Amino acid sequence: MKETILQLIQSYETIIVHRHVRPDPDAYGSQGGLVEILQASFPEKQIFAVGEDDPSLQFLRKVDQVDDQQFENALIIICDTANKERIDDERYRLGKQVIKIDHHPNEDPYGDVNWVETSASSTSEMIYEFYLFGKDKGLKITDEAARLLYAGIVGDTGRFLYPSTTEKTFRYAGELVNYSFDRNELYNQLYELEEKVVKLQGYVLQNFQMYENGAAFVTMKKDLLEEFQVTPSEASQIVSILGNVKGIKAWCFFVEEEDQIRVRLRSKGPIINEIAKKYHGGGHPLAAGASVYSWEEVESVKKDILDVCDPHQ
């Protein structure tokens, strides 16, 4: 598969790399890292990154402004995006061929070429593996590419704490830190929170609802977000904090937006991406997301989480 992808890259003059909507560090890292590698390796080609920037992650990399005409006869590479609905910038449809590179379950095998490794900790890990495959075939890596890929790996492994972290993950991360970038600055940028978000975090820790079977819930309605002056995106930054609670098995944040309620699911064991799929979402077995459109649906999601945490089910 990596050979097929490299041959396609070599055969195109224009390559446009996409990622998913509401990007996280792995989306930025895999997309930006791949673009940096390809720009260093093929300076004669036109290589772009597209999508809507997240203000909280612009320290990683800003996207390029690309005209519609440039998509014609372009190779499209989509990183870290499980299904078509989550691809940022629908102009990917204007390209000539589409490659999907992802580590989520391949429920929607869109595109002409699929490289999906669910055992990978992150798509950034896969991009580094692609570089290792091609480094004797003309691929070059830069310090900036290493910074981005390292950020993506760190972000999707929860600083190497999540079960998706493997011996390979540590090995690749160990190689990436040998490149020239400021790791301490990167960690600060990734994990420092605005004061208002920290105060919301305190509210969550005092007000989350936990059941005897290990299910827990946090509800953030618009009036609460307005009280703390945080956006739904900022509120979602703290979804992992309940992972330190003893006895918790799976938990969910319900974050109200203008036209929907975001469902952020996390787990220490019970499989929760099947629940996400039921509500038109998806993700990993222990980290997933979805959207619902009423508080009645929220109650339905809660029941599903309670059921999956019940050892007698």
Image (cartoon, grey):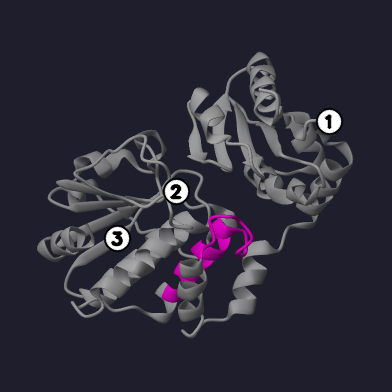
Q: In the rendered image of this protein, does residue 91 appear above or below residue 44?
A: above
**Residue 155 highlighted magenta (yes or no):** yes
Q: What residue range appears in magenta?
A: 146-166
Label 3 sits on residue? 48
Residue 282 location (% of width, % of height): 48, 35
Marks 1 & 2, CB-CB < 8 Å contact: no
Amino acid type of the residue that numbered disc 1 sits on in the rendered structure: Glu
Residue 309 location (% of width, % of height): 69, 31
Quote the CA–CA distance across marks 2 and 3: 13 Å
- Of pointers 3 and 1, the one earlier in the residue sequence: 3
**Disc 2 crowd, CA 10 A, few/some/many (<14, 14-19, 20+):** some
Label 1 sits on residue? 212
Residue 203 location (% of width, % of height): 85, 43
**Disc 1 crowd, CA 10 A, few/some/many (<14, 14-19, 20+):** few
Q: 239 or 285, which lies in front?
A: 285
- Of pointers 1 and 2, the one earlier in the residue sequence: 2
- In terms of image quadrants, where is residue 183? bottom right
- Taking the spot 28% from the left edge, 77% from the top edge, the residue there is 40
Label 1, secondary structure: give it.
loop
Label 2 sits on residue? 52
Residue 242 location (% of width, % of height): 76, 46
Label 2, secondary structure: give it.
loop
The mark closer to the camera, 1 or 2, is 1
Q: How many marks?
A: 3
Q: Is residue 41 left or right of residue 18?
A: left
Q: 42 or 118, which lies in front?
A: 118
Marks 2 & 3, CB-CB < 8 Å contact: no
